[in-house]
Image: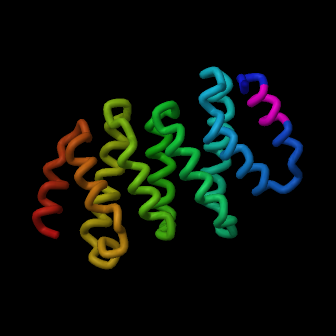
């Protein structure tokens, strides 16, 4: 039977992996599948480390694409345990850096966020980002998850969504 000590040993062993992207993928996979075995303190420490790596990866012009699947698996698997403000911050980083290749993964992840735990600042930012996508015909046609994301935002945001309503009526 696996326990926290086993997961901590695995994470320590991963630190010896010499290839940076393989190290990152390994951390993401362990936290995706075994993060629930960690105490809140250990989980928070490793999550902070991994999210910093994700943010650096997003900004890297020479990013290794194969990491993306593991990033979204990690975030989806732990969305109920990670601070949802941080999850939305990562989603917004994908959008702001014009990483269209991950558009449906991002919008799909937004649907899992608990907006009752999200600051008004991030609620407003994700609302504006989704409205910008909906208003751009070229973008709108390329987002398969846009409609579901709009419905989720409309139902779950704790801020005024009348702008979103107007956008949906118009487009």
Tell me where residue 142 sits by quadrant. Answer: bottom left
- Of residue 145 and residue 82, the one placed in the foreground of this image is 145
- Of residue 123 and residue 25, the one placed in the foreground of this image is 25
Tell me where residue 143 sits by quadrant. Answer: bottom left
Q: Is residue 8 magenta?
A: yes
The location of residue 152, given as percent across then percent down, is 27, 48
Q: Which residue is at a point 86% across and 48% down the rendered structure image?
A: 17
Q: Which residue is at a point 89% across and 43% down the rendered structure image?
A: 16
The location of residue 74, given as percent across then percent down, is 58, 45
Please identify the dominant SS of the magenta region: helix
Tell me where residue 66 sits by quadrant. Answer: bottom right
Instruction: Please say if 144 is above or below 58.
Output: below
Instruction: Please say if 137 is above or below 47.
Output: below
Q: Which residue is at a point 72% across and 43% down the rendered structure image?
A: 27
- Which segment did they paint magenta? 6-12
The location of residue 150, given as percent across then percent down, is 25, 55
**Left or right, 75 with reference to 131:** right
């Amino acid at each position: 039977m696996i326990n926290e000590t086993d997961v901590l040993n695995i994470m320590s062993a991963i630190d010896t992996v010499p290839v940076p992207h393989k190290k990152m993928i390994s951390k993401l996979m362990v936290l995706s599948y075994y993060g629930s075995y960690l105490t809140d303190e250990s989980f928070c420490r490793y999550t902070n480390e991994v999210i910093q790596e994700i943010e650096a990866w997003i900004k890297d012009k020479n990013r290794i694409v194969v990491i993306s699947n593991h990033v979204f698996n990690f975030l989806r698997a732990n969305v109920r345990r990670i601070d949802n403000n941080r999850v939305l911050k990562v989603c917004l980083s994908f959008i702001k850096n014009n990483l269209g290749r991950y558009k449906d993964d991002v919008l799909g992840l937004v649907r899992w966020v608990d907006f009752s735990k999200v600051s008004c600042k991030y609620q407003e930012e994700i609302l504006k980002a989704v409205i910008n996508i909906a208003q751009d015909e070229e973008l709108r046609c390329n987002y398969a998850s846009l409609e579901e994301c709009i419905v989720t935002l409309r139902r779950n945001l704790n801020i005024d969504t009348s702008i979103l309503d107007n956008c949906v009526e118009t487009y």
